[in-house]
Image (cartoon, helix red, strand yellow):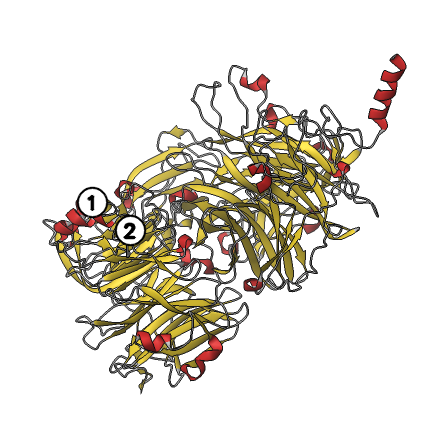
Amino acid sequence: VAALSGAVGCTSGASSGSANLVGANAQVFAGTLLFLTSSETNELRVLNFNPPNSAVGARLWVRGPNPLETLSIPVLDRPTSLGIDHVFNEDGSETIGSWVYASRAGGDQISIVDIDLTVGLRELRRLTMPAPVSLTAGWTLPGISRLYVATYDGTDGALYAIDLPQTRDGLRALSAGLAVPFATLGARVRLVTSLPGETVTSLLVEGGVTGRTVDGASFCATQGEECLVLATRDNQGSGRTVMLDPTSLRTTSLAFGAPVKFLTTHGKNDVAATGQRVFAALDETACGSSDCGGVLAVDTLTGSAGAFHIMNDVSGYPMVPIGLGDAVVNGLAVHAGASLYVPAALFDGVQAGIKLYDALGVAVGSNSDLLFFDATTMEQLDTDSASPVVNTAVYADSAGNSQSWINGPQYDQITFADGAWRAQNLVAVWQGVVPGVAQLGTSDAEGTTLQVPSTVIDRVMVGDFVVFSSVAGACDDATVTAVGAASITVDHLPCTGRLTFSVRGGPRAPFVVSSTLNGYLGRAAEGGVLKYYGPYLFHIPSTQIDNGYRPGEPTLVLPFGIDTETSQPQRGASWTLAIDGHFAPYASIVDPTTCATSTTFPTGALFEAYDTIPHVMVLYPSAPGVVEVNPSLTGRGTIGSSSGTYCYH
Amino acid sequence: MRRLFALVCFSVLTACPSQPSPTPPPMGQFYFPTGLAHVDSAQAPDGILFVASGNFDKRYGAGSLQAVNLSAVNPPLPAFGAPVNGVPVAITDLGVTDAGLVSIASFAGEVGAVPVTDGGYRLFIPTRSEGMKVMAIDAPALAAGAAPLLVCFTDAGVSDRDCGTNATSLDQIQFSRSTSGVPRAPSPFGVAWAPRGCFTDDDCYNGTCSHGQCLVMNRNGQPELDNNVFVTALQQTDSPYLSGLNLRGYLTRLSSATPDAIDAGSFINIGPGGASGVVTDGRWVYFSGRYVSPAGSLLRAYDTDGGAVYTSALESNFYALDARAIGRSTDGSHLFIVTRVPDMLLTVSVHNGNTSAPTLRVEHSVSLPDSPNELVVLPRAGRSDLVAVVGVGNNTVAFYDDALGQVVGHIGAVGLQPFGIAADLKGPGARLYVSSYQDGRVVVIDVPDLDRPQDGRIVAYLGASQQCILLNTCVDGGTQ
């Protein structure tokens, strides 16, 4: 089926024509139809996964009244967000309702689009909300399509529930023309909750989960009655995530511990009910980089202390965020019961094969990666089963010129924790500048007590060297005589006109050690041992391998020696160890030639629910289009049409 | 006869400013307007707007820079924040006089307004036509009751209104004909400035250190606080000339006091790839990079202290192909970069920006309307910045709220191919000026409250549409 899909699915030309998407910013899947925004042309386009008179697996753009043209659904200006009217059933299946909702960031309108393929696929009514719309989400009830709308007026947010008719005639009866003013909705509208100083960044609607409790009390536990999960961000940059019972208005926190950009969940599988596990992409703005980003999951079956907590991973300890290195996560999708073609290391150790996961996740990143992960064990899929090693070691003098090795870091005795190291260089510098205590500003007025940020003060030791710069150039060294909470004291002031100072490792620990990705690792004395307690990329149970995850244990142990009798190194001499972390996460990158346009920057993903083997639909506004990835045919690295990857634009 | 000739010469030398030559677009008419800058004025509550006309099709002999007293246009601009009843005011009488218009080279880029000692401004305008010149034009402080005045700071050309002919070239023949063929900075475009700092007189080789800034004699022999003016070049150069080898871009550093005193040391080799937008932040000059196969340098930085050029390599974690405008957050913790392919606003975090080793990390991005170009950062009290971004492809201005990390407002129908943007902060709000490249006007947008950008609206158009010029249908020699 997949091969056939490939053969006929690449149909950006052929009989369906091109959709001429300009601004593929959002997508939703409705039964057999994929709705996409074409933001700059103020319309939606529709990709049919079950087109008439076509082979199984074919995808064709729905045609317009003129069969030579691709159907255009004109909607509000510049649609950038889509919501869908649907419901998840107890067995995990999804029932699609009547409407797709289109809105725009910063706009107060919502286009309601009829999703019926035979007589619909047009905007029927356009709501006007009292404030710009942040997001929409739908939930289908008997006789009612309930539309949840999050708004933000520049200061405060609000969440509304609007009960819409499920029939065309009923919807048309809301107003004489296309526009439906908010004031005319009357009793159909309910303000669910106000959000002072907050805006909604992500909104999930899901059914209650049987047996769900918080501190022993039932909460959002009625299957068929909707519960909401909201991620919010306030106007100071903080954020929170809560589950909200829209009837009782009780809330329970989802303890992601950081602001969240977007949320998703998956259907029922053998280990969790539909909506039980909530996955979040953390907002990197909390700290300014991917260091605080990544994907976390919370299990919402049993809450304690008023919150649902981060899931444990396969090690039995709370999971670590699943990240993309220095890139940020642009999109996230999870599906219960999905297959992935994996290498032998993840299959049976002998050969590659297709592996069925209880839940498979994919995070798409700003570095072009489509990162697959096990969404049940919450593991990175490391396709390299080897442990970290030091590949090369180089000694260089203070000028950076390679020299014969002298004793320093004893890398033959190094030990790593597996799952904690990416490929990078570890550098030990003799009397090196202490990271974070370099070129700090000073002046003559500061005297012998110099201010050092409290966050790095613990890197400084008594006896370290202090190197000043002055208006006249370099000065002689001073020596640290005391270390305070946020200051150091030096023994003398070697010059006037002082402008900056830096601290270099002194005799107590002259080796200053850092690595290119982890940053400052620590300091070591001659004959000492550096123990570094770094973050993990993922946890490998210590029951599986000796150097697996052990809480509280260092992720690096490195002995140091020095042969001072034969070779005292100069200040600034360095030892560089090239570490191969043997960490090879399962990341695929779409071959740019797949679309014959730019598929370098994915911004969103979803699993379509039509095929037996769910495919991932990845948005590429730069293409502009959507790329279909068949996980059962794909592989790590570059993927293209030969591995079930096709482009529609 | 000899007496008549002398009389004519005398009248030329002493009369009101002579007609500019080469001939720029008509007075009061913008023609393919590009860069623009707004400055405050004690004599004009709405300030002065400087607008560069690019003269894209070279219909005229030159481009122009015009100075508009925004408090003296007719009809007047609506009161800030006042409702306009859905119909923006068309303002065709800009009150520009002969003295407020100078000719500049065609294909102008951004306009940088550097404050100078007398309370006026010196305007720097990179241009991309023959000679690849940077104009330096003085706009003295507006006198009471007077119209704005523009004066060529570097030598005027065939008339005192011609600021283009003798402007500083960044693609000088002596370099292109040298053995190496460099340095050259073709297609200068972006401009930013920063005070030329100092600790002692020794730091100001041609002047003295005055309160941390170099005080020098300007090219007219007047004492003046000096500034570094940084100009980007869209194109990279080859070495030797026309060899296609050893490609590298240059960032040019000029002195605001002596902008025509450039030599090889004025050109900073920034490595492969041209640059686009530029912004200064204390020690560092940050500049974005245009597309270079296989990948451009999204962000590089120049250390004004040590002279090093730092390549951020952000493109390895943010796969955009092209970068345009760049801005700095008010607190200096972020840079905002407009990217193309995809059309995004990228937020970059800056740590240790005052050291020799700043850390620049990809932090966040949001989708923007089609073909974003220039941006302006709008500070807000007690809150993170609002960023307004011009979208060329769909005639839009989008507003990004840095506190929320979302696009929170959007104004459509902003002229035709809007290009540049300038802001006049007014209390809790701002009045924005957007050059409409294909339309020949400047669109005026009021945002009464920067916390509510959704209330932003177009309130006026400055200038007459250039459509009749393009279609050759103007009547009575006018612009209508």
Give B99 or B354, whichever is nearer the viewer: B99
Q: Chain of mark 1?
A: A
Measuring from the top left, give residue B38's x and y in whole percent.
67, 47
Residue neighbourhood size for the residue with mark 2, other residues' Cα within 10 Å, grouped as few (<14), some (14–19), many (≥20): some
CA separation in Å, label 1 and label 2: 26 Å
Closer to the chain start, of discs 1 and 2, is 2
Q: Would you say A235 lies left or right of A492 here?
A: left
Residue neighbourhood size for the residue with mark 1, other residues' Cα within 10 Å, grouped as few (<14), some (14–19), many (≥20): many
Give A166 or B187, whichever is nearer the viewer: A166
Measuring from the top left, give residue B320's x and y in whole percent.
40, 44
Measuring from the top left, give residue A87's x and y in whole percent.
27, 74
Q: Secondary structure at mark 2?
A: loop
Q: Is residue A201 visible?
A: no
**Residue at 31 percent of width and 66 percent of height:** A264
Up-down relation of residue A334 to residue A388 (above or below): below
Q: Chain of mark 2?
A: A
Q: Residue furthest top?
A: B2
Where is mark 2, residue-wise? Answer: A69
Give B146 or A483, whichever is nearer the viewer: B146
Q: Secondary structure at mark 1?
A: helix
Given the image, on which type of amino acid does mark 2 rest? Glu
Q: Would you say B214 lies left or right of A339 here?
A: right
Up-down relation of residue A646 to residue B56 (above or below): below
Up-down relation of residue B471 to residue A532 (above or below): above
- Asked whether the beta carbons under mark 1 and mark 2 sit within 8 Å of each other, the answer is no
Give B274 or B16, whichever is nearer the viewer: B16
Where is mark 1, residue-wise? Answer: A641
